[in-house]
Image: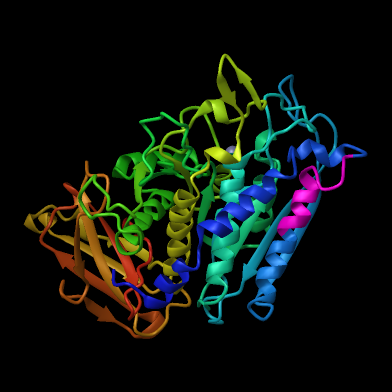
Amino acid sequence: MPVDPRIAHALQQISPAQIQHIIATLVTFRNRSTLSSMVKDLPPGTGVTAAADWIYGQFQAISAQCGGCLEVHRDTFTQEPGTGPNARITQPTTLTDVYAVLRGTDPSQTARMLLVSGHYDSRNSSNFNATDPAPGANDDASGVAVSLECARALSHLRFPATLIFVTVAGEEQGLYGSEHLAQEAKQQNWQLEGVLNNDIVGGNRTPGDKFQDEHAVRVFSEPVPADATPEQIRRILMLGYDSDSPSRELARAITEVARTYTGAPAASSHPTPSGLEPVLEFRTDRFLRGGDHESFNQQGYAAVRFSEWREDFNHQHQNVRVEDGVQYGDLLRYVDFNYVVRVARLNAATMAVLASAPPPPAHVIYPFPAHFVFNNSLNNTTISWQPAPGTPAGTHYLIVWRPTAAPNWMRTISAEKAGVKTIGTGQDATYTVTLPISKDNVIFGVIAVDPQGHRSPAVVPWPGR
Ligand SMILES: [Zn+2]
């Protein structure tokens, strides 16, 4: 994908000084436990509500710099207590999600949305301690810094589709803030094409740790959609699409963005010194753990999680203390601000590319009855698709494929070169290509591309008519 100079310039606006300022300020709120919203007589300038006020002000300040381009929202609601002996909210608790919307400028595409999120709540060793220090510098002031810096850098540009910059609370008690927002999104029919959750992206740098990789970020994606019915899962397994959920195609699209914008090499495990390589992790989240992207997965949205390469558990969910000469606590001093810059740039580039690209193609199928005719033509593959609603004029298409056991797309051909046949015009067009490659051995995808080369995520074909 070619570099878009507007996007490249915007990425340069994301600065380590700004990232440091955001994370250092969030740490000053002492303890951002969601439960602190119910504590009376907190010292001024401390607690989760003061942090929400500050984030809201940051979004407003960013908006003031772009002529009021952002709609800044503060969504406050009451979370009812959890159930069971392990409930981490035990009384009705006030929660606030703070987010800002940069509306898309193309009336036929403004309903399309890309969303970036981090959680601003924090915790220490005890879920119920809402007053002793819980700096949460890495977990997850770093993710909040990504959302705020994406908003600041991208608000100077305009995109056909809509961008949403989110910070949520309640993550540590059970993903409550993101659950609320994802449910709202579903009820209001938000057309979210991708959710980027950043949680623990501080690039922890404990002195002496030789295992951190400051040029790698993990990208977790679900294998099959969390909202798939048993019948849908049966069909996914039958077709061999157990590694092709929309979330996973989003993760693959991020690796494509990285090749262009963060200097990750196409086929090497040795990134350039200033680069950042997204490492695809083929599971929903880290082993037996979860995050806010799953709230969006539950509502049927494509959503992935970014996390630093190697976490240090002495610096997560710990009371700040020194024990046997070991410093515990999620302290500012362990955050690598340059690393957070790289992660923020990858997020911003992904949002900018996907919001500039046409919508992913619609009705991508292996048309019936081609796949039921048992003759030598079965070694060919015919794929057809249509433009999704809102697809602008000038959109063209790429066919990508990979061997069934390969993690990422390996081959690409333009639909034109593949001899695409078109029936109908404009929004009513149906495109068809036939390739001399058996779909028994590869997985195909179709990508929509605008005239500047911005690529949508891939869509895999399903048997259809
Ligand atoms: Zn977290």
- Of all residues, the one furthest to the left in this rendering is 376
Location of residue 202 with respect to 415 vertically, above or below: above
Q: Residue at x 36, y 40 (%)?
A: 213
Q: Quadrant of residue 239?
A: top left
Where is residue 44 shown, x and y percent of the image? 86, 46
Which quarter of the figure is the C terminus placed in? bottom left
Location of residue 97 with respect to 112 vertically, above or below: above
How many numbered markers are drawn? 0
| Model colouring | rainbow
Q: Which residues are magenta?
A: 42-55
Left or right: 340 with respect to 169? left
The residue lying toward the viewer, choosing from 308 and 381, is 308
Left or right: 229 with respect to 446? right
Which quarter of the figure is the N terminus placed in? bottom left
Where is residue 450 shown, x and y percent of the image? 35, 77
Ligand 1 is found in the corner quadrant, namely top right
Residue 447 belongs to the span the image colors magenta:
no
Residue 47 belongs to the span the image colors magenta:
yes
Location of residue 435 with respect to 196 vertically, above or below: below
- Of all residues, the one furthest to the front in this rendering is 325
Where is residue 445 shown, x and y percent of the image? 29, 59
Left or right: 384 with respect to 418? right
Q: Look at the image and tell me whether residue 465 can be seen.
A: no
- Of all residues, the one furthest to the right in this rendering is 41
Location of residue 124 with respect to 240 vertically, above or below: above
Where is residue 151 shown, x and y percent of the image? 58, 65
Q: Residue at x 69, y 55 (%)?
A: 184
Q: Residue at x 39, y 38 (%)?
A: 234
The residue lying toward the viewer, choosing from 224 and 451, is 451
The residue lying toward the viewer, choosing from 53 and 183, is 53
The residue lying toward the viewer, choosing from 381 and 79, is 79
